[in-house]
Amino acid sequence: MLEFDVTFNFSEPINPATFTQSDISKTNCNLSNLIINGDEATVTATPGTDGTVSLWVTANKFKDLAGNWNTAIDPWSIIYDGTGSAVDFSTPEYPATNENPVSFTMTITETNGINGLTQSDIDANGGTVINWDYSGGNSATFDLQTDGTNGSYSVSIDDGAFTDDAGNNSEAGNIDGELDYEAPHSVNGFECAVGELTNLGSFTMSIHFNENLADFTADNLNKNNCTVTNFQNNGGGNYSWTAHPGNDGFVAISMDAGVCHDFAGGNGNVAVPAWSTTFDGTATTGEMTSDLTSPTNTDIIHVNLNATEMINLTVDDIEVENEELVLFSGSGDSWPGKLNLTEMVKSKPLPLDFRTKPEISESLPIPPLLKATEPLPKL
């Protein structure tokens, strides 16, 4: 702790027996080592805290050699500053930024003046200090010019880079942050287990971004013929939701560029291409037709199955009673076939029935079209 001597000069020699340290009034200090020598007295003062230190003597505290009491001695004071200047760096884009250059303010905590502060006192990693501005006082501003790539930065100043008016060395200060110039994006886009065609009334979708987003919600999704519920931020840039198709037909979800942002303070997202499927929630219907009328004695019966939509149909899906299916071909929504009547059918009055099996995918049982209710003539 700093200490210093304070000397009292009197107009004449004083009686040393009448003057002690307790006769001296003081603020913010301790006194010691009072020495009286004729018409002067010296005392050592040790300051308490930073601030004003004062000493004075009120009237009638000591006497001169003739026995006269003293008059009041006016206060003596000094400002004590035993602390070096504190330094704090700040930027409006903390802790991550996409600005270039990055603006900084250097705030100096000091009640008195400072000396020797220059731009060269600032150490910077991740960029170069430019636009230095300091003209005295307790604040300096500057910018950090970066190379525009992602990474980290640090700005600092060492102990003793400058001094205050009391001669104290300044304290060290620093700030560290992240540089983020990359727009948030998704490598794989929207992901969903549903294929190009589905009859599911709801299904889960997800997307993974390269970083967390500050403001991504379901409202940022473009929704065509569907709604979205149960939107979840699963952390680490992962998001999921449930999609609900509306009407039968085309269903799509996409995301425009710049509708949400990362936590760096402004990088808008890259557009996400549309994911789509076709929703078919309606059962297939159809009918069977033939140029023949019942009854018939034709042993080759041509039958057409016409469905209301494209279907996948195989010979195993066709159920034939009392007949033999000898030819089956078709595609899409039209499936022609031939029936070859057996000798048993020719000789017995059995009904003819050509229909699809009830378990066929996306189909309803189709009522029998051709019935032979009368005996067929023998050939």
Image: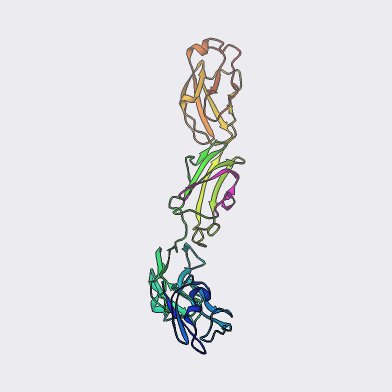
In depth, the one of 357 and 99 nearer the eye is 99
Residue at 44% in and 54% down: 210
Asked where in the image residue 58 lies, by quadrant, the reply is bottom right
Asked whether the viewer can see residue 299, the reply is no
In depth, the one of 157 and 210 nearer the eye is 157
Quarter the N terminus occupies: bottom left
Residue 125 % position (x, y): 37, 69
Q: Is residue 110 magenta?
A: no
Relative vertical location of residue 285 with respect to residue 5 in this rendering, above or below? above
Asked whether the viewer can see residue 348, the reply is yes
In depth, the one of 65 and 61 nearer the eye is 65
Residue at 59% in and 51% down: 219
Relative vertical location of residue 129 with respect to residue 373 in this rendering, above or below? below
Relative vertical location of residue 33 with respect to residue 330 in this rendering, above or below? below
> How was this image coloured?
rainbow
Relative vertical location of residue 88 with respect to residue 285 in this rendering, above or below? below
Q: Is residue 217 magenta?
A: yes
Residue at 48% in and 40% down: 195
Residue at 46% in and 52% down: 209
In depth, the one of 260 and 60 nearer the eye is 60
Question: In the image, which residues are magenta?
Answer: 215-237
Residue 265 % position (x, y): 51, 62
Residue 137 % position (x, y): 51, 79
